[in-house]
Amino acid sequence: MPRWIRGNALTVAMFGAFLIFLVLQSVFGWQVHNEELTQYGATPLSWWAYLGTGHFAEAVFENWESEFLQMGGYVLLTAYLVQKGSAESKPEGQTDRPDDDPRRATPASPWPVRVGGLPLAIYRNSLSIALLLIFAGSFLGHLLGGVVEYNQEQALQSGAAPISAWQFLGTSDFWFQSMQNWQSEFLAVGVLILLSIVLRQHASPESKPVTAAHAETGA
């Protein structure tokens, strides 16, 4: 295996799987959408044209939205809350780790740590900020793609006049789509937090060592 691939194998595997499943989603979504169009006597779309539809955008962004809300919220919550015995929690009573102290910065430390001030304040929270910004962008993408799809469905089914994105934000359709994904994401993380107390995965940084006591907290 080439050295670059070996050193970045986890990222390559994750983004490789992402691209494969995204393409497959687009293919199956295209078939479903064309079946719906055919039922109403509308002209089917090419796969390339389908990629620009609200149907595809809504399906993609409503899932991204929930994923990044979960990850951003999880990063923030684990900074302040603990779960005794979980590999996903920091030890009870721990505030900052010694290496979080900017006075311990070295020449190899990231630039904001060495500079201090506002850059350091932002950098200390940059992971949660980035994740929540991606959530906000995905939320907007879901809203804009969703209103296009909603208006098309209403036009095909009843010839109803289109509504604005702001009006769609107030519909039960939009929030039903969001909540069905949000609840599942937080359920999955909650299950991982609890299962990591008593279960192990050898060699994974997401698990406590196999020999660790159930009461031991943190990986």
Image (cartoon, rainbow, N blue to C red):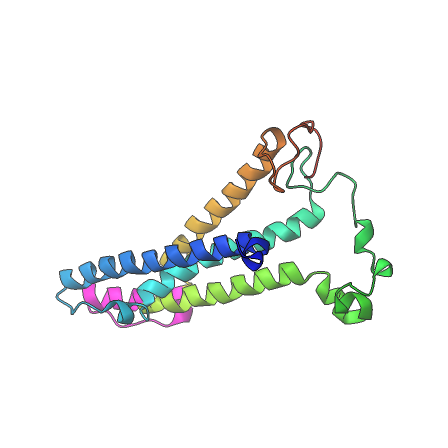
**Position in image of residue 183 (x %, y %):** 47, 46
Tell me if residue 76 can be seen: yes
**Position in image of residue 115 (x %, y %):** 81, 71
**125 vs 180: above or below:** below
**75 vs 157: above or below:** above
Q: Residue at x 16, y 70 (%)?
A: 43
For residue 18: magenta?
no
In this rendered view, identify the residue nearer to me: 12 or 85: 12
Query: Which residue extends farthest left?
Result: 41
Q: Residue at x 48, y 50 (%)?
A: 182
Quarter of the image with the C terminus in it: top right
**Position in image of residue 51 (x %, y %):** 32, 68
| 27 relative position to 197: left or right | left
What span is in magenta?
149-168
| 44 relative position to 131: left or right | left
**11 vs 201: above or below:** below
Q: Residue at x 39, y 60 (%)?
A: 60
Q: Residue at x 71, y 31 (%)?
A: 216
Magenta span dominant secondary structure: helix
